[in-house]
Amino acid sequence: MRKKDGKMQRALITGMTGMVGSHMADFLLKNTDWEIYGMQRWRSPTDNISHLIEYINKKERIFIEYGDLNDITSLISVLKKVEPDYIFHLAAQSYPHVSFVAPLDTLNTNILGTCRILEAIHILQQNPLIHVCASSEIFGRVGSDKLPINEDCVFHPASPYAISKVGTDLIGRFYAEAYGLIVMTTRMFTHTGPRRGDVFHESTFAKQIAMIEAGLIPPVVKVGNLESLRTYADVRDAVRAYYMLVTVNPIRGEYYNIGGTYTCKVGDTLQTLLKLSTVKDIEVKIDSGRLRPIDADLQIPDTSKFTRHTGWHPKISYEKTMYDLLDYWRNRIKKEGMKLDR
């Protein structure tokens, strides 16, 4: 779709080299005619966008701009150059477990980083449609009487990461209310699939199983807390939801829970992946290093508000998500060999 001046619509994805950002680029490439600009730090690995390198090198619809959430000068430079119509703010320090050992970096990147990019937009007086990605982790320790979790549930964050996402959520809404920026905030519940980082439970399970199948490690899967309850969505459904957020009657300052429909314990997810393995009799071993000091153990969403507003429903089954995740790691292990034990 072209704008009134004849230029193509432009989307800016912060964190395009991450799992969600790379799938966001895939979705926009396939389902729109927009120009897609990915913001990344110069040192960020490009594994997740390796299949897009040909487009990037040819400067064909997908472009890379170097910027850092911790450097407002770089953000202003990127925004001036791109002049985006849509912004998907997905960049973050996104690993809850890591946030316990790097709380200051997590808070700085996620809270102040979000503030910097919104402040840069405000300074430049730009008017894009902005998706700010918070997290279901903001709800943290939820009592069973509060399930399923709706948007008005009290915040009880259970990690520095979760605290940082509370800040992200509130800053997004503040800039909408105070300065009129068209910001919509999402609290996405567990979402996974191909390219999921190996520090997340279901992905490290799949990675370890793939290494076992390749004969690289003994038939033992190391795990943390298997009792936490999670509701799973596929990352490809998630990015479709984010697209609908900014294109289906976007409402400034609104905030939504988004998530899947399949709920089970983390231990059940492990069993699903073990059943998909070609190796039987794999041992499961608790690793104390994988346990969080405190855990958000009841993550079941009420997504009715977003569904009513956009008509979005997840399409990809839990079983396909887990199969594709395991297959992703099989292909990576086959190509790259041994991975870190984490």
Image (cartoon, rainbow, N blue to C red):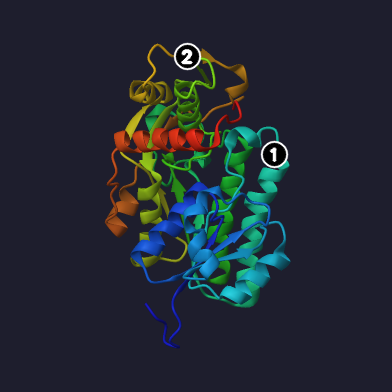
At which x and y percent is residue 335? 50, 38
Q: Earlier in the sequence, mark 2 or mark 1?
A: 1
Residue depicted at x 33% and y 21%: 275
In depth, the one of 339 and 167 nearer the eye is 339
Residue under numbered circle 2: 284
At which x and y percent is residue 16? 53, 56
Q: Amino acid at mark 1?
A: Pro
In depth, the one of 18 and 76 nearer the eye is 18
At which x and y percent is residue 170? 56, 54
Residue depicted at x 42% and y 82%: 3
Q: Amino acid at mark 2?
A: Val
Is residue 250 visible in the rendered image? The answer is no
**For residue 309, above or below residue 216:** below
Is residue 325 visible in the rendered image? The answer is yes
**For residue 260, above or below residue 265:** below
Residue under numbered circle 1: 103
Residue depicted at x 54% and y 15%: 286
Q: Residues within 10 Å of mark 1 (few under 14, many from 20)?
A: some
Verify CB contact (< 8 Å) between mark 2 and mark 1.
no
Side of 57 where 301 appears, left or right: left
**For residue 238, above or below residue 3:** above
Name the secondary structure under disc 1.
helix
- Residue 160, by quadrant, is top right
- The tag on residue 45 is none
Side of 259 where 210 appears, left or right: right
At which x and y percent is residue 251? 40, 65
The C terminus is located in which quarter? Answer: top right
